[in-house]
Image (cartoon, rainbow, N blue to C red):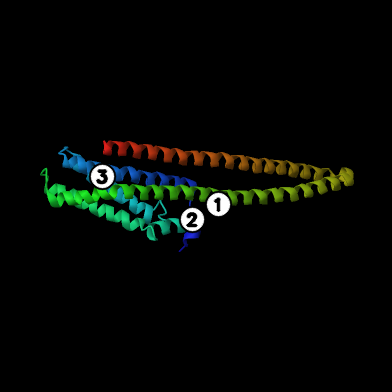
Amino acid sequence: MMNKRELADTVSGEIVGELINLAGRQRMLSQRIVLHVLLSVRGESGALAVARTCLATFAQAHAQLVDGNDHLPGAFSEALHGLYFGSHRADERIRGFMRVATDAIEALERNSEPVCAPRDAVIGRLTAEASPLLDLLQAITQAYQDEMQSVEEAARRRQMGVVHELAAISMRANIVAMNGRVAAARAGQFGREFAVITAELAHVIGEMDNLVQSVVGARRGVDGNERGAALRAGRINRATSQRMNSHHTG
């Protein structure tokens, strides 16, 4: 079994991008849970069903982020593992929020009267946890964005290592081709066939050089696209959270 550092080296930028979106969605879902619980208290029809659906989606996403599945790696790095299970106790706190949310929903299902002290106490605990949880979920999203930078840097190092190796091979092949051309010229008519081979070798070397340059250029483009996508996802998630928070406070 791979350790966290080895596992982190195998995670692609595309996967981390999915994790960023998943983590960002958790912020929106947490607010929707609280919002629809409060709307249910006010008697809005269907609000409780929405709250339960959001809670189920929230719980499933948390399991995917922490434990992973066939597609996602879970808390794949030491930093993420420390965030979830270290001093921040993110996993424990999130599971605690889910338990309180479940209690609030079940209390509302048992008693929908306008005033019910035990039920209202549970809902009070839920609303009290909403803001601290939102800050925690924001920190988790930021941690995944930090991982994106680490993954991109590791990918760049691996790719540039390949590029440097190709460049070294190309340089050595150029020397061989040059020596071959010199030998063919010295051999006169007897070196014509050898000259054809060295010319073809020079052509292959040129294609290799072009490949190296295209890889470098493509890497720069991918870096920009992945970073832009991650930033856009972060802005979208923040905007969604702000709208939900505005609705909640309004």
Position of 181 relative to 81 (above/below): above
Return the residue nearer the eye: 69 or 59. Answer: 59
Q: Identify which residue, 207 or 81, lies in the foreground.
A: 81
Question: Spatial distance from mark 1 to mark 2, Cα to Cα?
Answer: 9 Å
Report which residue position mark 2 lands on. 8
Residue density around tag 2, few if under 14, some if 14–19, many if 20 or more, within 10 Å = some
Q: CA distance from mark 2 to mark 3?
A: 32 Å
Total numbered circles = 3
Residue matched to label 1: 154
Where residue 66 sits: x, y (%)?
37, 55
Q: Answer left or right for 170 relative to 80.
A: right
Q: Is residue 8 left or right of residue 186?
A: left
Q: Would residue 21 be visible to someone looking at this image? A: yes
Give percent across and percent down for residue 65.
38, 52
- Residue type at mark 3: give it: Ile
Q: Quadrant of the C terminus?
A: top left
**Looking at the image, can residue 101 be seen?**
no
Image coords of residue 234 (percent x, y): 42, 41
> Which element carries disc 3, helix, strand or loop?
helix
Residue on which disc 3 sits: 33
Pick whichever of labels 1 and 2 is earlier in the sequence: 2
Q: Of the residues shown, which amino acid type is indicated by label 1? A: Ala
- Camera-nearest residue between 33 and 125: 125
From the top left corner, tell me how far across and down residue 223 is, in percent.
Answer: 54, 42
Question: Which residue is found at the position 62% from the left and 42% from the top?
Answer: 216
